[in-house]
Amino acid sequence: MDILFQQIFNALTIGSVYSLVALGLTLVYGILHIPNFAHGALYMVGGYITLLFMESMGIHYWLAIFISIIIVGLLGVVMERLVFHPLRNAPPIHDKIAAIGVLLFLEALVQLVWGAEYRRMLSPYDIVVDFLGLTVTAQRLLIIGTAIIAMILLHLFLKKTITGSAIIAMSQNREGAFLVGINANKVAMITFFISGALAAFASSIASPINLVFPGMGHLVILKAFVIIIIGGMGSIPGAIIGGYILGFSESLSATFISNDYKDLIAFILLVAILTIKPKGLFVKGAQS
Amino acid sequence: MMSFLNKRNTTILLVVVAILVPLLTDNPYLLHIFSTAFIWTIGVYGLNLIGGFTGQLSLAHAGFFAIGAYSVGILTVKVGLNFWLALLLGIMITTIMGFLIGIIALRTKEHFFAIYTLCVGYIIYLVIYKWEGLTEGVRGLIGIPPPAPIGPITFQTPKSQYYLLLFFLVFTIFIFTRIINSLIGRTYMAIRNSEELAQTIGIETMKQKLVSFVLSTFFAGLAGGLYASFVRFIGPDISYINVTFDMLMYLLVGGIGTLSGPLVGTLLVVWISQYLQFLQDYRMLIFGPILVLLIIFYPRGIVGGVQTWLIKQRAKKSQKEISQNLQSVVVKEEK
């Protein structure tokens, strides 16, 4: 039974990270209908910036995360302005390819600046604690706790502020949002900022238990796509629930089936879902 | 000048130049670059068929390329089959996989299709990487033999391999041109422009998309099989997502949805990459932004851009002629 609880705890940890990444992806998809393949690059850049500020400047972990969130958020805004804004009337194939271009560029840039080797991020919370009879590192507790706080904050922002309502309105009905005078450019920029910030936050809290390297975003972004298809493209609660579903199926199958193929679980899940429902689960009836 | 450089003559001229290259230079390095570019061009034609002409962006093509390559590799190294038989079987295996994946993948549309195929590509990569008993995993397959001789013709030297690959490239372009210029090609373009509309005029879109997808995996499998015996070593890296992105870049630089785009794009990018050797992994610093700029300003790549320019020139010319004629008419009438 101990193993089971340990795995449930692991599932919550990775599920939290997946949910944060998927939230950013789903927000952008909801507003602009772009599957942002470059989102994984934002995740990776976030990890590197936190590491940079911690290592070379000796800044405290939390402050480094904060700086990383701001920088990657702004990077998201720049991306929207320079790449996706000029393409807003282009055929759907173009956004995807442009996003891939951005992804390749950011990866090469990071590799040029920091090299290709794997790096460790040392967090001040790498201590082992006893939690409800389980021995876990404090970092994992911190991931679950802060991720849930971040999701609550995002929820409050979207529900209680005018800007948040504008984002929700635009993702629900673009034309309707324009009719009531919502500034599409502003909403798109804010959405990209939030999306980048969430990615940076997710990678900053997850890096101490993983490693930092240029390709670290690949698997995460693919899984985030699986999650938002499970949860319904553009749906915010869907991204959160989907993230935890994937986290659970992965860590349980790693224990009870095979650790080698645990990364395959997500994709087999996706292939199974899209085979049965080609438009994804929970697709909104009005949208094609 | 323009009348001489029509489509047929340009094609003949290009083929002649391509045949002459090994006679002019003995530099094996140069021949190697050309040969590699030819292999990728074949694969990129496959991507162009499904992505450019049928409008379904498949991100699994490195996977199909790798299936072709590994089929040939395993069949020649482990089973000991003759290369040509292995190539044939390899292509068959790839197209059968393409058919099976296509049946399911093509039920999804647009973004879902791109994401679905991206994940399929990743599954293929993981399977190749983890299935050590069959694929040797991360070590890769070593010692794949060069193409077996056909009668007196052997393929041991860089020159003979160059000609072999050139032959397959010309074959690919020939087939591709025939497809595109036929009714089937028009059907694909109809589907690309609007699937609903195509359905309304009685096109069985699902069937046509599937045929297009299987054909595109045929080219990918052929390219993969040739790659295996040309490079003689294959590792799981050739099925990684980045290879699909590379192919996509070749296609975009040349011109997605154009006939000569894959050829122009692949040759050009492979050449430039050679000059940027010192950049190696960082070449994406240059190609990434180029990709984005192309998509924004020249969505149909170099070939598409030139075509648009030519059409504009022609339009200007004919407009000038018309206005001149009009003027002369007016002058005559005034007299």
Image (tube, grey):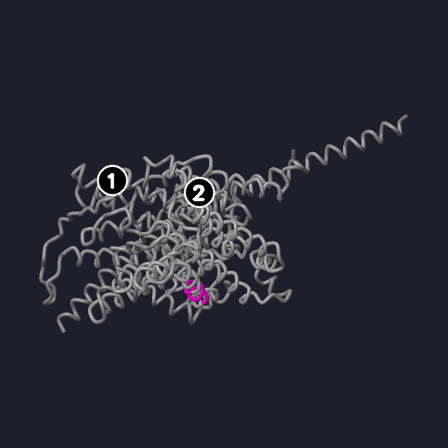
**Residue B283 drawn at (x, y percent):** 36, 39
- Disc 2 sits on a residue from what chain? B
Above/below status of B8 relative to B187: above
What amino acid is at disc 1?
A: Trp
Label annotation for residue B233: none
Farthest front residue?
Answer: B152
Above/below status of A196 relative to B4: below
Q: Is residue A233 visible?
A: no
Q: Is residue B61 left or right of residue A155?
A: right
Quarter of the image where the N terminus of chain A is located: bottom left
Marks 2 and 1 belong to one chain: no
Q: Nearer the viewer, residue A239 or B69?
A: B69
Q: Which residue is mark 1?
A: A114
Q: Is residue A272 visible?
A: yes
Q: Is residue B257 left or right of residue A14?
A: right
Q: Nearer the viewer, residue B217 or B151?
A: B151
Q: Nearer the viewer, residue A65 or B86?
A: B86
- Could you tell me how far apart the alpha carbons at marks 2 and 1 are, in whole angstroms? 23 Å
Say which element carries label 2. Answer: helix
- Disc 1 sits on a residue from what chain? A
Query: Which residue corresponds to the image point at 77% horizontal and 30% vertical from the top-left?
Result: B324
What amino acid is at disc 2?
A: Leu
Q: Mainly helix, strand or loop, the magenta region?
A: helix
Say which element carries label 1. Answer: helix
Q: Is residue B295 left or right of residue B333?
A: left
Q: Magenta residues, as a range?
A: B93-99
Q: Which residue is mark 2?
A: B291
Q: Could you say which quadrant of the image residue A219 lies in?
A: bottom left
Q: Is residue A137 left or right of residue A226?
A: left
